[in-house]
Amino acid sequence: MEKIEDVYICTEGKMVYGDLCIEGEKIAAIEPKTAPQEPRPWLLPGCVDAHVHFREPGLTQKADIASESRAAAAGGVTTVLDMPNVKPTTTTPEALKEKHLLFREKCVVNYGLWYGITADNIDEALELYGQPDSPRRDEICGFKVFLGSSTGGMLMNDQEKLRHLFANTQRVIGIHSESEDIIARNRQKYQALYGDDVPVEFHPKIRDVEACMETTRMAVELAIETGAQLHVCHLTTQEELDYITHLKTQSHLDNITMEVTPAHLWFSQEDYKRLGTRIKCNPAIKRMQDRDALRRGLQHDLFSIGTDHAPHLLSDKQGGALRAASGMPSIQFSLLTVLELAHQGYLTLPRVVELMATNPARRFGLTDRGEIAVGKRADLVLVDPQQQTTITRDIILSKCGWSPFEGTTFHHKIVGTWVNGTPL
């Protein structure tokens, strides 16, 4: 039996000083002790990141399962749910099987896989994965729908087909919410002014608030109509947050949840001047008022934090608003980013645990993790609040080799991670 001694353990919404005992893969005991005067490290449940792009198969020049899962573990993330926009896309049973084989061989943390929905595969997806008695139900964590185009070319915005999907499953449906029509209209406007060299500062004007709000409203209305389990991925605007929060206040819509990324909590459009295309992502990082609204939403309204970890080579990030690849690596420093926001007073430490571990675990049926309790999986992260971390190129583990957080100093340091009871 392994014992982690003399730490503050975040359990049941409070910090308990003592020892934690691990037997095999599970938490065997929590042994409270009298707290000392001096500060001690914090033991938190490992983070559950429900939104990652590990780029394998097919895009391994950018990242791969081994490199990105090591980065996840270094950042205190012990479970990842990987998105389907790889090559080939995870939109067929054969592609899903191959991807499982790769993750079982290479991933050093626990994992699950999203299944991509296209205009052509809905009926097969529902039959194989969408029902309680579906023969391959446990092979996926949910269905991913790209209502706006992004990396991977998986646009699916046929509203009647979406209604068919929403009405015929209780699996979680994650959406990338942007209106392709509005994006195209905005793109044409700026191309008329700049040609193909539209400066990156116009990225949030091409993928604007209206583009996000249009499809989010449509998806929410479908979820209310059908009772579907809707998960709005990487929410970016004050308008979307206010709209969904108002509806949930009026009616108990537990079937609709909102995710936010550390990048959209940390950066605003003011940072394009400093970081350029390094913070270009879809949906775009937008106004300061959006960032500030999302930060306020951390206290009560937002449901979970997922990174949308999406590595690209720096050579892919050249070309401004139209040609530079969208996405950035973030998983290694996601917990540190949110802990910094807690340090600044935007949320409490137990709320960090809710947003980054407990809530995503429950949303995706991972009932054996996401909290520290006897009998739960010993997925753990040890944080020292007395040490700082400065992000430098030499500590980055993502294969792409860079981070938009380079040069940032955080007030905490991750000093240990356990996956299934094993220290990494």
Image (cartoon, rainbow, N blue to C red):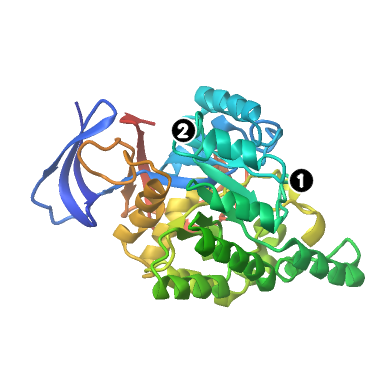
Disc 1 residue crowd, few under 14, some 14–19, many 20+, Cα 10 Å: few
Q: Please, what is the three-letter code of the amino acid marked with disc 1?
A: Ser
Above-or-below relation of 227 to 95: below
Disc 2 residue crowd, few under 14, some 14–19, many 20+, Cα 10 Å: some
Count of all numbered marks drawn on residues in the image: 2
* Percent position of residue 240, x then y: 56, 71
Query: Could you say whether the residue bearing mark 1 is in a helix, strand or loop?
Result: helix
| Nearer mark to the viewer, of 1 and 2 | 2
Numbered tag placed on residue 315 in the rendering: 1
Residue at (51% x, 56% y) in the render = 230
Q: Where the C terminus falls, by quadrant? A: top left
- Quarter of the rendering containing residue 285: bottom right
Q: Where the N terminus falls, by quadrant? A: top left
- Quarter of the rendering containing residue 94: top right
* Percent position of residue 104, x then y: 50, 24
- The extreme left residue here reads 34
Residue at (33% x, 41% y) in the render = 369
Query: Could you say whether the residue bearing mark 2 is in a helix, strand or loop?
Result: helix
Q: Nearer the viewer, residue 141 or 223?
A: 223
Q: Which residue is mark 2?
A: 138
- 209 left or right of 6? right
* Percent position of residue 31, x then y: 12, 41
Residue at (54% x, 48% y) in the render = 168
Q: Nearer the viewer, residue 135 or 181?
A: 135
* Percent position of residue 208, x then y: 69, 70
* Residue 370 in view here: yes
Numbered tag placed on residue 166 in the rendering: none
Q: Please, what is the three-letter code of the amino acid marked with disc 2?
A: Asp
